[in-house]
Image (cartoon, rainbow, N blue to C red):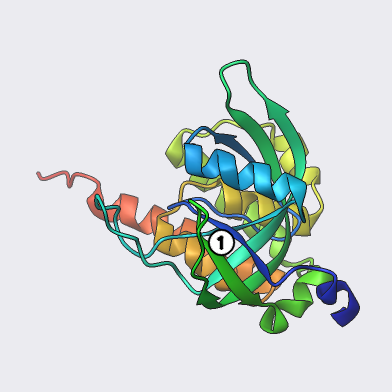
Amino acid sequence: MRSAAQSVPTRFPIFPLEGVLLLPGGNLPLNIFEPRYLAMVRDAMRTHRVIGMIQPTEPERPGHRRGIYRTGCLGAITRFAETEDGRFLITLTGLCRFTVVEELTVTTPYRQVEADFERWLGDLAPVEPPADARPRLLAATRAYFRRRGIETAWEAVSGAPLAALVTSLAMLCPFAPTEKQALLEAPSLEDQAELLITLMNMDARADRANAPQVRH
């Protein structure tokens, strides 16, 4: 695992984006149109073809550089296309989570960090969640999707490998940014599965608590 980690650069650009989650093994499509991030993708394509996805810790304000969480996920550019109007359509595939050591002083219009992967080496050889998590996760997901009005092909969902299902649900479900960050920082796929079930069940309890009370 360490040899695989050593092949990944420890200095790379970051894309701070609130409410967007990339996990190891997941695929994240992005529509790039801001000039600073167009430059970031161009430079990444010329070098290691990697970008770190990370969430900001505060709202955006004019002229203010937002703080960022210390944990993000490094992604490889596995799909790249340029549109006629100059946008980049890319897909990032999650490689490994990282811890920010420091943000670098750079002349590029985009931000860059020095990162450490030591805490997250397990991402390079993930352990499948226990099989008994599947029925509980599927039941929670079905109820959550029904409440949220999310339509999906249930045959494909129920037949997906459990690890891929956990990653996809964590990335795609409309959780709050802090909940997304909690999923990112959960140590293992098993922990992520349990947190997913908890978040979905909390959503159900919140719905019941907010439901109008019938008085007689």
- Amino acid type indicated by mark 1: Leu
Kindly identify the residue that appears in the image at 62 percent across and 15 percent down: 84
Residue at the spot x=70%, y=72% of the render? 10
Q: Residue 179: x and y, percent?
A: 45, 62
Locate residue 163: give its quadrant: bottom right
Does residue 133 lie above or below 210 as drawn? below
| Rendered-image quadrant of the C terminus | top left
Residue 39 in which image quadrant: top right
**Horizontal and vertical percent position of residue 176:** 40, 55
Q: Is residue 31 left or right of residue 68?
A: right
Figure quadrant of residue 151: top right
Instruction: Point out the residue furthest to the top here.
Output: 84
Residue 75: percent from left, percent from top: 70, 55
| Residue drawn where x is 47% and y is 36% of the image | 34
Above or below, comparing residue 170 to residue 87 in the picture: below
Describe residue 64's horizontal placement relative to residue 97 as left or right: left
Which element type, helix, strand or loop, lies under badge 1? helix
The reply, left or right, for residue 36 in relation to residue 67 is: right
**Residue occupied by mark 1:** 196
Asked if residue 156 can be seen in this view, the reply is: yes
